């Protein structure tokens, strides 16, 4: 008798692993504590439209990832974003020389993970708190005390703090994961009744509480929305203001935005603040994916590679490859 493989996390890494395992003919069962897929690529529905508060776009360096992106494009899940990009340093705003190709989910970032999820079996709003070994196979327990299983193998595709806890049955893996530090990021959305009089669609920022701002309606598939901007604070500023009240975060980042954007910025008609406690991994790792194949436990995520969407997807592929290789032996 064969049992399915449990995958904890439906961010891009978990879905990448799920797709590769399903393509190899294996049965998977996904779990996520969120109400939908996407994790740090998720989009938030608001009264001013759907906003990308996490990953803003992704770039493509690896050949395999580039092939996958072309397939996603043919499904209409992603589109190339050709923003009017600027750099801001020492208070000076200049057109950016950066000519990288940038991709985004369309009409919202989460469209990509929705597409990848397809009709894979998934349980949302289900926070897994424990991965434990039953008589012969793996079992999961959620925060409500419900048990799921049996599973032949488990792929943990969550950020490191959660992964370290879920991998307690494999202490070596757990201690590697526990050593990965994550940086927090505040993200703020501001909406304006009148479109701001600026050519900027996106801007990389230095010497400011902000490190990035982007205009939502400048992205493919979002043209009809009001003039809403997403502002991302630097990790440094976020660390220093981790517990600041949301209204004050909005106020301070609004001030920094008004200072740099080079046009009149009226009071916003809508504001929102979101804190990513585990936003981006500090530094890069060359792990690909972590595995204790003899136990049947695997871990993947952006933190195993580059800390970007591409790294997360490649890490999911690598977890699946290691799992399939072990099953073949
Ligand atoms: P995640 O997306 O974090 O997915 C993990 C999933 O696990 C989540 O859905 C979570 O709900 C679930 N989960 C966690 N714990 C549990 C549990 N106990 N039980 C069940 N489910 C659980 N990358 C780029 O390439 N370009 C960018 O412009 C960019 N900008 C960014 C801006 C911000 C503010 C942030 C925060 C990140 C940004 N990134 C960017 C990074 C990018 O978002 C991540 O690298 C990528 O989305 C990580 O994917 P992942 O699958 O590894 O993890």
Image (cartoon, rainbow, N blue to C red):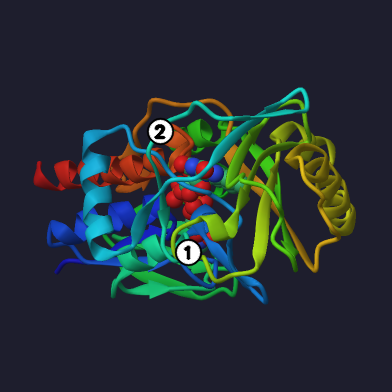
Instruction: Read off the residue under disc 1.
Output: 108
**Toward the viewer: 171 or 328?**
328
Quadrant in the picture for residue 178: top right
For the point 27% across and 42% down, the residue is 65
Q: Position of residue 222 (x, y in %)?
A: 51, 65
Sequence-first tag of 2 and 1: 2
Observer-side mark, 2 or 1, equals 2
Which image quarter is the C terminus in? top left
Quadrant in the picture for residue 293: top left
Instruction: Read off the residue under disc 2.
Output: 100
For the point 30% across and 43% down, the residue is 319
Tell whether 237 sits left or right of 201.
right
Q: Position of residue 304 (x, y in %)?
A: 42, 35
For the point 37% across and 66% down, the residue is 30
Which image quarter is the N terminus in? bottom left
Q: Could you tell me how far apart the alpha carbons at marks 2 and 1 are, in whole angstroms?
A: 20 Å
Q: Position of residue 104 (x, y in %)?
A: 42, 53
**Toward the viewer: 250 or 41?**
250
Q: Is residue 156 visible?
A: no
For the point 48% across and 73% down, the residue is 124
Q: Is residue 40 visible?
A: yes
């Amino acid at each position: 008798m064969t049992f399915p493989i449990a995958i904890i996390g439906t961010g891009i890494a978990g879905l990448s692993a799920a797709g590769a395992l399903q393509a190899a003919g294996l049965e998977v069962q996904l779990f996520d504590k969120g109400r939908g897929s996407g994790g740090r690529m998720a989009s938030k529905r608001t009264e001013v439209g759907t906003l990308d508060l996490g990953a803003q776009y992704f770039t493509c360096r690896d050949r395999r990832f580039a092939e996958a992106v072309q397939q996603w494009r043919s499904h209409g899940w992603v589109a190339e974003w050709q923003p009017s990009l600027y750099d801001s340093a020492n208070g000076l705003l200049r057109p950016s020389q950066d000519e990288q190709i940038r991709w985004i989910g369309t009409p919202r970032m989460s469209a990509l993970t929705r597409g990848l999820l397809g009709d894979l079996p998934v349980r949302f709003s289900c926070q897994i708190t424990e991965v434990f070994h039953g008589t012969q196979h793996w079992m999961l327990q959620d925060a409500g005390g419900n048990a799921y299983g049996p599973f032949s193998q488990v792929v943990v595709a969550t950020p490191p703090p959660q992964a370290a806890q879920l991998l307690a049955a494999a202490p070596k893996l757990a201690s590697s994961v526990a050593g990965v530090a994550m940086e927090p990021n505040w993200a703020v959305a501001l909406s304006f009744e009148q479109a701001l009089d600026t050519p900027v669609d996106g801007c990389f920022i230095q010497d400011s509480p902000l490190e990035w701002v982007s205009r939502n309606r400048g992205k493919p598939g979002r043209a009809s929305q009001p003039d809403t901007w997403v502002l991302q604070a630097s990790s440094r500023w976020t660390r220093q203001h981790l517990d600041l009240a949301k209204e004050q975060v909005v106020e301070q980042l609004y001030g920094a935005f008004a200072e740099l954007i080079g046009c009149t910025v009226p009071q916003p008609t809508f504001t929102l603040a979101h804190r990513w406690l585990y936003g981006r991994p500090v530094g890069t790792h060359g792990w690909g994916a972590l595995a204790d194949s003899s136990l049947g436990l695997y871990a993947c995520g952006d933190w195993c590679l580059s800390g970007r969407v591409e790294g997360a997807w490649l890490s999911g592929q690598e977890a699946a490859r290691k799992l399939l290789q072990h099953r073949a032996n």
